[in-house]
Amino acid sequence: MWKEKINSFLREELRLELHPDKSKILLLEQGITFLGFRIFPHHRILRKANLRKFHGKLKELKILYKENQINREQVVEQLEGINYNSL
């Protein structure tokens, strides 16, 4: 019902169409995954898979720093340059 109304509005008003296989109506309490985050009505969290990858990258940087293979500035550059959506 809601999906049909939304699809109708998008088609008539904006000349857009929903992809039939990629569009779903979900309860907001469950949250939705979007751009690497789980988004809820009042907050968002980084997806667990992305968080695990981040911790792995951080562990790797700590080892390289401890072994003097990279300096502090390089660690900061690496952390600032992380694309959290691709983790």
Image: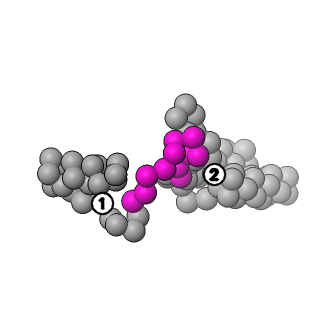
User: From which residue to which does the magenta span run?
Assistant: 23-33
**Residue 30 seen by the camera:** yes
Which numbered tag is attached to residue 81? none
| In-front residue for pair 43/84 | 43
| In-front residue for pair 27/72 | 27
Q: Mark 2 sits on what residue?
A: 47
- Label 2: which secondary element: loop
Quarter where residue 45 is shown: top right
The residue carrying pointer 2 sits among few (fewer than 14), some (14 to 19) or many (20 or more) residues within 10 Å by Cα, namely: some
Q: Position of residue 35 (x, y in %)?
A: 49, 52
Marks 1 and 2, Cα distance to the nearest angstrom?
25 Å
The residue sitting at 34% across, 51% down in the picture is 1
Quarter where residue 68 is shown: bottom right
Check whether the beta carbons of the residues at disc 1 and disc 2 lie within 8 A of each other: no
Which numbered tag is attached to residue 18? 1
Tell us which disc is closer to us: 1 or 2. 1
The residue sitting at 34% across, 66% down in the picture is 20
Q: Position of residue 30 (x, y in %)?
A: 58, 46
Looking at the figure, which quarter contains the C terminus?
A: bottom right
Q: Earlier in the sequence, mark 1 or mark 2?
A: 1
Judged from this view, the residue extending furthest toward the front is: 1
Judged from this view, the residue extending furthest toward the bottom is: 21
Asked if the stretch drawn in magenta spans residue 32, the answer is yes
Q: Position of residue 59 (x, y in %)?
A: 79, 55
Q: How many numbered marks are there?
A: 2
Does 47 appear above or below 19? above
- Label 1: which secondary element: loop
In the displayed structure, does residue 2 sit left or right of residue 32?
left
Does 17 appear above or below 76? below
